[in-house]
Image: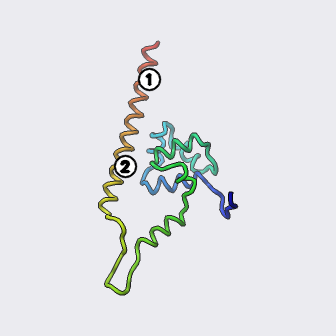
Amino acid sequence: MSTQTRPNHIGRKISRIRELRDMKQEALALALGTNQQAISIMENSETIDDVKLAEVAKVLGVSVEAIKNFSEEAVLNIIGNTYNVDNSSAVNYGCTFNPLDKLIQAHEEQIKLYERLIQAEKDKVEYLEKIIKGK
């Protein structure tokens, strides 16, 4: 394993991925069955246990490796290499994807997240009903 010049701050990486997903701490907290304060504490933590990290990755729709390997520089490089101006023509943005496709994909991912949130709430209600019936 190579020595890194910067600490591998997992909490900060989770925070940035969550922000890039346009997700609030409250939404992540709800999906994980916790509260916003716990998410804030987690995002300020340099390390997070593997089980919790796997749960967070699932909710954010990324792999654990994607969180561990996330870097702001990589995102900026992708953006910098995707959009460029070619002086030989009027303007050439070099866009390698259809923005509408990306918008639809993001919307579909949001729908899947909401479906998972709803299922989590249904599971909680079912669990609580079992507890009540057991008394």
Apparent side of residue 29 relative to residue 93 in the rendered image (left or right): right
- Would you say the residues marked 1 and 2 are in contact, meaning their CB atoms lie under 8 Å apart? no
Q: Is residue 60 above or below residue 98?
A: above
* Residue 103 picture quarter: bottom left
> Circle 1 is placed at which residue position?
128
Apparent side of residue 84 relative to residue 104 in the rendered image (left or right): right
Residue displayed at 53% across by 45% down? 39
User: What percent of the width, then of the height, locates residue 45?
Assistant: 62, 49
> Circle 2 is placed at which residue position?
109
- For this orientation, the residue located farthest to the front is 1
Determine the CA span between mark 1 and mark 2. 29 Å
Who comes first in sequence, dot 1 or dot 2? 2
User: What percent of the width, then of the height, locates residue 116?
Assistant: 39, 39
Q: Amino acid at mark 2?
A: Glu
Front disc: 1 or 2: 2
- Disc 1 crowd rating (10 Å Cα; few below 14, some 14-19, many 20+) is few
* Helix, strand or loop under label 2: helix
Residue displayed at 39% across by 44% down? 113
Q: Amino acid at mark 1?
A: Leu
